[in-house]
Amino acid sequence: MDVLTVLASAGFGSTMYLTTLSTVSRLNQQASRTKVAGLVVVGMVLCALIGTIANASESVVIGFVVGAGITPPVHRWILQRPRAVAGH
């Protein structure tokens, strides 16, 4: 197992999670018809991406799963941190 491949794939998995989260958040603000069509397209893209990754090496699969698995709790933690007030 190549460690650099795992790390690169973890970064890609994390990026895909955040991109999907952002896309779905924007789609939820759209009209019902646009929302449904957009969610179908997002689902198809994710299925194709996961299928492609499943055909890749074991290192790629492990990295992608780790990256996509670690990102949600870290993202929630970052959003919940208290922010410093500028100028104080």
Image (tube, rainbow, N blue to C red):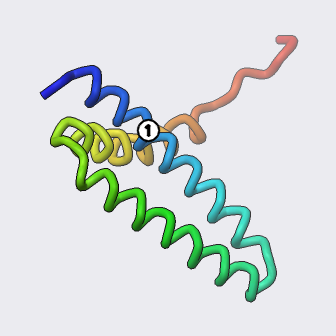
Residue drawn where x is 50% and y is 64% of the image:
45
Residue drawn where x is 55% and y is 35% of the image:
78
Given residues 38 and 77, the one toward you in this image is 38
Q: Residue furthest top?
A: 88
Rendered-image quadrant of the N terminus: top left
Q: Residue furthest left?
A: 1
SS of the residue under disc 1: helix
Rendering quarter of residue 87: top right
Q: What's the residue type where badge 1 is placed?
A: Phe
Residue drawn where x is 27% and y is 37% of the image:
63
Q: Position of residue 3 (x, y in %)?
A: 21, 22
* Residue under label 1: 12
Q: Position of residue 80 (x, y in %)?
A: 57, 40
Q: Residue furthest right?
A: 87
Location of residue 19 with respect to 77 vertically, above or below: below
> Left of 1 or right of it: where is 87?
right
Rendering quarter of residue 57: top left
Callout count: 1
> Left of 18 or right of it: where is 82?
right
Location of residue 1 with respect to 47 vertically, above or below: above
Location of residue 51 with respect to 69 vertically, above or below: below
> Left of 4 or right of it: where is 74?
right
Rendered-image quadrant of the C terminus: top right
Q: Position of residue 4 (x, y in %)?
A: 28, 21
Given residues 85 and 64, the one toward you in this image is 64
Dot 1: within a 10 Å radius of its alpha carbon, few (fewer than 14), some, or many (20 or more) residues?
Answer: some
Q: Position of residue 37 (x, y in %)?
A: 66, 81
